[in-house]
């Protein structure tokens, strides 16, 4: 049986950076669990905001959370009210000072996470999986992707 490594692991430090940037001598497990909790909470809370990537950086007293999203307006809200709410909620989870940065993904058709998410939402919305995959591949190629590979599994067509 062959051992496959995650393709992200091959690219770390060369093409892509880490999703968590911090160092810990002690309490490594607590910080890692806290990162997982933050990511899980943000993915659930910002489900409709098309979140592509969440990067967490830590210093001694501050946690900086950078959210890459296709729809920053949903996260920011009117006059930045939603950002303040989100900061307070994250502060309750972590019990530390939290700083939020929000970056817009300019071309969501070229982001693998966002394309996969849109296909999944279309399938959940009872659209034919073949049509959903072909439409997503076509729009990505139109936007200038060099190639697209789509793999769908599970109970499809009944």
Image: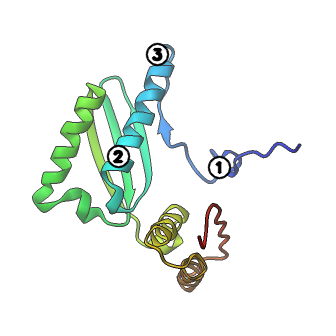
Looking at the rendered structure, the secondary structure element under dot 1 is helix
Q: Nearer the viewer, residue 156 or 14?
A: 156
> What residue would you read off at disc 3?
27
Q: Is residue 96 left or right of residue 155?
A: left
Tell whether 133 sits left or right of 59.
right
Mark 3 or mark 2: which is in front? 2
Residue 128 image offset from top left, x and y in percent: 54, 79
Binning the other alpha carbons within 10 Å of mark 2 as few (below 14), some (14 to 19) or many (20 upward) gives some
Distance, label 1 to label 2, CA atoms, is: 22 Å
Farthest residue in the front direction?
158
Residue contact between numbered discs 3 and 1, judged by CB atoms under 8 Å: no
> Which disc is residue 58 wearing?
none
Mark 3 touches mark 2? (CB < 8 Å): no
Q: Which residue is mark 2?
A: 42
Residue at 33 percent of width and 62 percent of height: 48
Looking at the image, residue 139 lies above or below residue 48: below
Determine crowd level at label 3: few under 14, some 14-19, many 20+ residues with C-alpha closer than 10 A.
few
Which residue sits at x=23%, y=30%?
A: 92
Residue 17: where, in percent of width, then height? 56, 47
Q: CA distance from mark 3 to mark 1?
A: 25 Å
Which image quarter holds the N terminus? top right
Name the foreground residue: 117 vs 34: 117
Disc 3/disc 2 C-alpha distance (Å): 23 Å
> Mark 1 — residue?
8
Write down the quadrant of residue 144 in the picture: bottom right
């Amino acid at each position: 049986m062959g051992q496959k490594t995650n393709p992200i692991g091959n690219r770390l430090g060369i093409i892509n950076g880490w999703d968590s940037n911090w160092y810990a001598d002690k309490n490594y497990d607590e910080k890692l669990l806290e990162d997982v909790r933050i990511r899980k909470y943000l993915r659930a809370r910002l489900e409709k905001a098309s979140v592509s990537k969440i990067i967490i950086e830590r210093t001694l007293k501050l946690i900086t959370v950078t959210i890459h999203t296709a729809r920053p307006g949903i996260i920011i809200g009117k006059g930045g009210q939603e950002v303040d709410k989100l900061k307070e909620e994250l502060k309750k989870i972590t019990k530390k000072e939290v700083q939020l940065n929000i970056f817009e993904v300019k071309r969501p058709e070229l982001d693998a996470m966002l394309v996969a998410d849109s296909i999944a939402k279309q399938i959940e919305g009872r659209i034919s999986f073949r049509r959903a995959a072909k439409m997503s591949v076509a729009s990505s190629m139109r936007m200038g992707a060099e190639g697209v590979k789509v793999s769908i599994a599970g109970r499809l067509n009944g």
